[in-house]
Amino acid sequence: MENIEEKRRFPRFNLLVDVAVTKRASSEAEKVLSSKNISQGGVCIIYYQQPTMGELVDLKIRLPGIKDEVKAMGKVVWIKEISIGAQQKTKRFEVGLEFVGLNDSTFEMINRYLYNNQS
């Protein structure tokens, strides 16, 4: 099995924040989900329903202490099913979203935030 860590270009920072997710080309309403971690290249979000590999979504990431939301497009690049609770009947999905078409100023804002706010 291939190690995901080896394929990463950017270090991950554990960061639990709200991320508003809207499927592109869909009439579904925006869903506010929680992140698990974030990097300059993408974000891992906990989904309640399994998304489709390769799916494109619009993201609004709410970073603490930052006035404006970080707006980006993400592409589903990996999905890992996880079970919650003692009975393990409740399923969730850790979903890796790679930022697509991120402009330089947004990339730099994420970079500065992550490196200035790490514990």
Image (cartoon, rainbow, N blue to C red):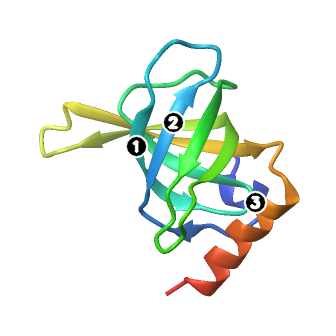
Q: CA distance from mark 1 to mark 2?
A: 7 Å
Describe the element under mark 3 as helix, strand or loop: helix
Task: Answer with mark 3 or mark 1, whichever residue precedes in sequence.
Answer: 1
Q: CA distance from mark 3 to mark 1?
A: 21 Å
Q: Residue at x 68, y 45 (%)?
A: 72
Q: Residue at x 75, y 66 (%)?
A: 10
Which residue is the site of mark 3? Answer: 106
Which residue is the site of mark 2? Answer: 21
Which residue is the site of mark 1? Answer: 33
Q: Quadrant of the N terminus?
A: top right
Describe the element under mark 1 as helix, strand or loop: strand
Q: Position of residue 23 (x, y in %)?
A: 57, 24
Q: CA distance from mark 2 to mark 3?
A: 17 Å
Task: Answer with mark 2 or mark 3, whichever residue precedes in sequence.
Answer: 2
Name above or below for residue 23 compared with residue 83. above
Q: Nearer the viewer, residue 8 or 100?
A: 100
- Classify 10 Å Cα crowding around label 3: few (below 14), some (14-19), many (20 and above): some
Name which residue type carries label 2. Answer: Val
Q: Residue at x 48, y 41 (%)?
A: 20
Q: Position of residue 65 (x, y in %)?
A: 49, 74
